[in-house]
Image (spheres, helix red, strand yellow):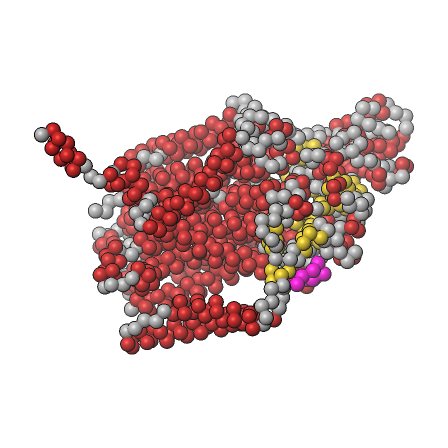
Amino acid sequence: MKSKNPPASAGSQASAIPFWRDAGKRAFIFQLAALFTVGGLGYYLFSNTQANLARQSIATGFDFLNKEASFEIAESLIGYSAADTYARALLVGVLNTLKVAFIGIILTTILGTVIGVSRLSSNWLVSRLSALFIEVMQNIPVLLQLFFWYAIFYEAFPAPQQALNPIKGVFLCNRGLIFAIPEAHNAHTVMGWILIAVLVGGWFLNRWARRRQEAIGESFPVLRVTLFMALLLPLLAWVAYGTPTAMNMPELRGFNFSGGLSVSPEFSALLLGLVLYTSAFVAEIVRAGIQSIGRGQIEAAMALGLRPGQILQLVILPQSLRVIIPPLTSQMLNLTKNSSLAVAIGYTDFVAVTNTTINQTGQAIEGVAMIMAVYLLFSLSTSVFMNWYNKRMALVER
Amino acid sequence: MKFTKIMVLTIVIGLLLCTVAQAGKDLDGVRKKGFIQAGVNGGVFGFGMPDEKGVWRGLDVDTARAVAAAIFGDATKVKFTPLTAQQRFTALQSGEIDILTRNATRTLSRETQLGLNFVTVNYYDGQGFMVLKKLGVKSAKELDGATVCVLPGTTTEQNAADYFRNQKMKWKPVVIESTTELSKAFFAGRCDVLTSDASQLAGIRAVAPNPDDYTILPEIISKEPLAPAVRHGDDKFMDIVNFSVLAMINAEELGITSKNVDQMLKSKNPIVQRFLGVSPGNGKALGLDEKWAYNIIKQVGNYGEVFERNIGVNTSLGLKRGLNALWTDGGLMYSPPFK
Amino acid sequence: MTELAAVRREQLKPPVVDIGVIGWLHKNLFNTWYNSILTVCMVVVLGLLLPPLFKWAFVDSVWYSSAEACHDIDGACWSVIPHNIRFIIFGFFPEGQEWRPALAMFLLLALVVYSRKRSRWQSSLGCLWAVSLTVMGVLMYGGIFGMPVVETSQWSGLPLTLMLSFFGMVAAYPLGIMLAIGRRSRLPAIKSLCIVYIEMIRGVPLISLLFMSSIMFPLFLPEGISINKVLRAQVAIILFTAAYIAEVVRGGLQAMPRGQYEAAESLGLTYNQTLRLIILPQALKIVIPPTVGILLSAFKDTSLVVIIALYDVLKTTKVTLSNPKWTGCSTEAYIFLALLYFVFCYAMSSYSRRLEKELDTSY
């Protein structure tokens, strides 16, 4: 940057040079003008808005957050009823957005990786089909895909009274997918805790194994051991509690199914559309990442006698991940932002709840500002993570 | 580079050429423009929906036409903007439209917090429920556990929440932004119940694939006085809109229709003479042509005609006058004297 | 002798598994044991899926029947498209005037196709564009030559989609370049303004900008002034796309080695000249692939205007489908629309690949 600075001689000859020829002063005036223009424009819009709001006596401020929302929300991760406040309704919306984004990100990563790798497969059929998938999904607007899946969900599936029942305890109808879940039992909580403990243990095991390998050069099958323990220990706990097998079965009562867990058509359509659309982009990123590794590296690794699994783990992944992760994060962010299209198919995400709030309170400015703030928060925290990640990668690179 | 410059220039000029509409105070603005911009529903048969030829039809649409007839003497000097439930009030607040005739319910908070003025009610409505006949539901009290299709951000949504809370019944809302999409989801069986204003339910049922499969439950759970609205701030314009609606009601009270209005001009009844501007005064008071009421009746019709034409018993909606009959027939339609 | 020759010829032939169909199959589908399993699985899945799909789409389907006839068949009801094609493509454009948007669209596409060769990028082409855009505007709006005026509020369907995306791309590109240069500027105020703008816009979903343009922006303007709804959405799309283009172009600018600036400076070029003649031509070239990605997104994203009730081609399709007569034909109509979008996007991305190859001067 320094090299592009204006010539330092400008100051000494200031008296001789008219100010519009002086690069330093010109730059200063130019910036001042730009700031004034932007500030002036901002002030102009602000004062117009103030005048408009005052003239039409539209309420302003965030007082409405404490008022009773008095509308119902179909899906909620936390307890909510129409008697709760707008603030709580908006929180429900944020959580719904996070829910679809979280599940979507996991599924997209898996599907995108599978397709990206298939695209490079030596199997002609597999690689052609993946290419077809990528081309088709990338070139159709995601909103159209959402409409498509939603229409399929409620037009092609039967009413709850004639629900499809492929296996016991699973029902498929135009109210969504309803399936049995295990009846709540102490054993499940314990099993969950054990699983977490095993995963934490696995992390420590991994550190120990790496240090040991650096010291004496022997490797330790961390992944296999951890996976084995993660399956075995919760199972043992389950047996110890006397193998509780009671299931919470869904059954048709009145209009709808009660019991079990149900996934609404809105949520399914949104998830399906977002995952299919985004995974096409992720597949391309994964492919580029793998292709960025020179053929020579793999051959060198083979020459050293590494097994294919080891090559993937020790040679390919660490390098290609550095290429893959940054664009992958931005795709994940895109998925989160695209989840705002939920409003078009009736899934009550944050935008949909805010939309209703705006409509009831008439406070459009506050509402849109909140939408922007929440999504900005998402993306800012992602870029904080990215900076941290890049720094870490840079350290490894030395 | 020359190529780029020419391109950029073209685009800039193109953008500048796009219209930036200029208006003053509401009434002056409307006069200067030469037409009224009316916000309508766009998706409710009988109230505001384009027919196959793209011509707007409906009770709300005709109300806007009446205002145009009053101001310009020409009922066609009105342009319609279809609005979603969410956009409607902002569109009015911001001046994008001059008058909102989009089956909006008059409520206290809308008059105060939203800065709107509602004028005389042009349709008294109430919220009802529509279900599939097959389900065998006879009363709204049997709807426990039902999935209910409802428009988001409407009084309907709040009423439904209140009703189910009051009755201690569980329900699951399905919210979709547009009336047409919502009714499509209902017909496809996405929900058991569709709740909306009773008139709208009739309109939706009228266009259903098999109208006889659906039944509207007897309970009316709310009061929904639907009225045209204008912005705060121009009382003269509000008076005109208000009396345009009233003129249609008054004409029905006086027995003046679009067919007999020309003969009525010769009427000896001083009330009729005053109303139709034969003896001047009313027009001047409103700042309009003395023929304003005549123009409304001649070009649009009286309230009864408009009602029967769009939603009456002979249309596919088949609505009875009910609360919307004249006060002399046991309804609520009542016009103050035009003097 | 002859026997021997026959044997020799026999020997000269490569093994049968290496050539022809079998060889190809062996090399591409059955080269390892897991590839063989994969192939078999794929073939089975395709065999289960494709025939019913084919039967649905082509055998049991109807193409020109009435809506009522559609209810009695098992296959696809493609009739929904020919019956409603006028409304899907032209929306509210007055009946009998459809030739005008059709001609305008044809003109636009023809010009785009004509401009694809780089040798034709001269100032005369710029004039041609200027003239044609004016002609298109006149065609759409009318008012002269006996063509009735058609308000912008009646512009809908495919012309609206094309208009929003074309101007969205063309206007966002230079704006994005300016923002990218601003972000690399050594003037702190300019730099921070550009950074704030780019990061703000990139951090929020397009739909929030569209909401802003549709329900909030009118409150920003002084009393009595209102700007056309379509234009507001157009501006939102431009502002949104420009921020993304700026980020891409910045990547290209950053890839330029310092030596290029210094060499230009030592030749006595001013800052503007350096950018215009040295830096931008190279930087823009290396970012063609991501730029096209952004432009494609911009094209697809115009469909979001559905949410603020503008009647683009997706909305007109939905309106058609909301007619109870055609309920149940959503799949068919959406597939048609998907094909439409696919053709446009695919054409654009293939063109970009060719342009990239043409401009590739590396060796």
Split into 4 quadrants, where in the image is the N terminus of chain C?
A: top left
Residue at image point 39% right, 34% down: C112
Count of labels in the image:
0
**Residue A286 x, y percent position in the rendering:** 37, 54
Relative height, residue B266 to residue A261 (above, below): above
Residue at image point 66% right, 30% down: B51
Relative height, residue B322 to residue A47 (above, below): above
Residue at image point 55% right, 33% down: C75
As drawn, the residue found furthest toward the left would be: C1
Query: Quick check: B118 left or right of A147?
Result: right
Residue C171, quarter of the rendered image: top left
Of C216 and A15, which appears nearest the observer?
Answer: C216
- Was residue A79 drawn as part of the magenta stretch in this picture? yes
Residue at image point 33% right, 69% down: A395
Query: Quick check: C325 left or right of C114?
Result: right
Q: Is residue A120 visible?
A: no
Secondary structure character of the magenta stretch overall: loop
Q: Is residue C268 visible?
A: yes
Of C332 and C41, which appears nearest the observer?
Answer: C41
Query: Quick check: C146 left or right of B237?
Result: left
Query: Quick check: B312 left or right of C212?
Result: right
Residue B126, quarter of the rendered image: top right
**Residue A27 x, y percent position in the rendering:** 37, 58
What is the magenta range?
Answer: A77-85
- Was residue A395 drawn as part of the magenta stretch in this picture? no
**Residue B23 x, y percent position in the rendering:** 62, 41
**Residue C331 x, y percent position in the rendering:** 55, 38
